[in-house]
Image: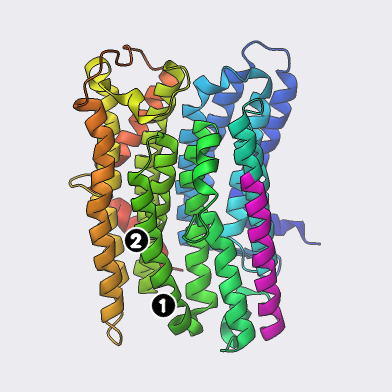
Amino acid sequence: MNYSQFLNMIPEATLMLALVLVFFADFALYKSERKTFVLGVLTGALLLCQLVPCFLAEPATAFGGMYVSSPIVNVMKTILTLGTFIVVVMSQKWMASNTKLSGEFYMLVLSTLLGMYMMMSAGHFLLFFLGLEMASVPMACLVAFDRYKKKSAEAAAKYILTATFSSGVMLYGISFLYGAVGTLYFDDMAQVIELSPLTIMGMVFFFSGLGFKISLVPFHFWTADTYEGAPTPITGYLSVVSKGAATLTLAIILMHVFGRLVEYWEPLLWIVIMLTITVGNLFAIRQTELKRFMAFSSISQAGYIMLAVIGNSAQSLTALTFYVLVYVAANMAVFTVISAVEESNGGRTDMAAYNGLYTTNPKLSLLMTLALFSLAGIPPFAGMFSKFFVFMAAVSGHESAPFWPYFVVFIALINTVVSLYYYLLIVKAMYITKTDAPLPTFKNGAAINWSLAICTIGILLFGVCSCIYEWIDKAAVAL
C-alpha cells in the first residue's frame, strides 16, 4: 500500500492529528481542575489552525479515485470548520457543568467533522457511506450527551433509529445502482448510467436516505424532537454543520453522477422543495418552544438551500455554498443567544422566557434580532443576498421548461413572507410583549461574547463583501 497517498488528504490528515492531540490531552489532564477550559482552548485553537489546510488545499485524488478533493469541497470544509469552531466556543459555559465528559465531547465533535470531510470528498459510494456513518454515529452520542435528562435520551433514540433506517434505505438504493451499472465510482457511473427501473429506484432510495440528513419533507419527522432534546450547542451543530455537508454532497452527486437523468430527478426535487419550505414554515408558526421553533425553521431553510440545485450548474453550487456560509453565521447567532438565556434562566427555552428581554438585556436582544432578520432575508443583512443568489440560480438554464422553476421560486418567495411573520414573533416577545418578571440582567461569559461577535460580523459583512462570493464562485467553476 502506498501510504504517500495520505499526503493528498491534507485536511483529513490534519484533523485526524487534532483528534489524536485532544485524545492524549484528555488523558494528561484527567485530574486537572482546569481540564474543561484547557481542552476547549486546545480544540478551538486546533480548529482555527485547521482552516489553513482547508483553505489552501489543492485538488487531489487518492486510493484509485475513491477520494476526490475539489476546490468547492475545500471551501465547504473551511465553512464547516468555522461553524464547528463557533460551536466549541459557545459550548464553554455549558461544558463547565460537564467537566468529567469534556474530553469525550470535543473528540466526538472532531470525529463528526472528520466524517463530514470524508463524505464530501468521496468519489465512490462506499467511501461516501463510510463518511456518512462516521458523522452520524458520533452525532447520536452528542445528542444523548445530557444522559440524565429524559428528553436527551429520547432525542438520541429517535435520531439513531431513523438514521439506521435511512442508512438501510440508502444502501438498498446503492445496491440497485451497482446492479444497473456495475460500478460505484462516481465518474464511471456518470458515463454509463442510463434510464432503467433499477437506476430510477436506486436514485430515489439514495435521495430518500440523504434527505433524512438534510431534514427534507417527508423525511423530517425526527427533527423537532431531536432538536428539542439535544443540548443547545449540539442542536446548533446539527442545524448548520451537518446540514451543510449533506446538502453539498447531495448537490454534487445529483448534478455529476445523475446528470444524465436530470429530467427525472428535477421534478422530484421541485415537489420536495415546495413541500419542505411550506411545511417547515406552517409548523414553525405553531411552536412556542424555541428549539422546536428553530427545528422547523431549519427544515424550511433546507428547502431554500436545495432550491439552488434546480439550476444544475456551477452557479448552483456557488449559491448553495454561499447560503450555507450565511446560514452558519445567522443560525449559530440564534442558538448562542438561546444557550445564553437558557443558562441564565433555569434551562427554559420557551418563547415566553424572552418576553421583555429588551428591557433587561438590550444588546442580546439586538443581536438576536439581527440574526432573525438575516434568516428571514431582510435587507441589508447577508440572508437577503443568500436568498437572492439561490433564486437566481434556480431560474437559470431552464429555457426549455421555463414555467416550473419560476413557479417553485414563486412559492419560495411567498414562504419568505410567511417566515418573516414567525421570526417577528420572537422580536415581538423581546421588544413589545409586557411582563411583570422579565429575565433579569445578566452578563455573558467571554466565550459567548466571542461567538456572538463572530456571527454578527458574518451577518453584517458576508452579503456586502463581494470577494467572499467571488472566492466561492471561482471554486465552483473549477469543479
As measured in the structure, the alpha-carbon distance from the residue carrying label 1 to the one carrying label 2 is 20 Å
Picture layout, residue 26 above or below residue 245: above
Picture layout, residue 440 above or below residue 411: above
Checking the image for residue 365, the label placed there is: none
Residue displayed at 31% across by 55% down? 469
Picture layout, residue 165 above or below residue 459: below
Residue 472 visible to an observer of this rendering: no
Residue 394, quarter of the rendered image: bottom left
Residue displayed at 69% across by 63% down? 168
Type of residue at label 2? Answer: Ala
Element marked by disc 2 = helix
Image quadrant holding the N terminus, namely bottom right
Judging by the rendered image, the residue that carries numbered circle 2 is: 319
Query: Does the magenta portion include 170?
Result: yes
Region in magenta: 158-183
Residue displayed at 64% across by 66% down? 170
> Crowding near pointer 1: few (<14 within 10 Å), some, many (20+)?
some
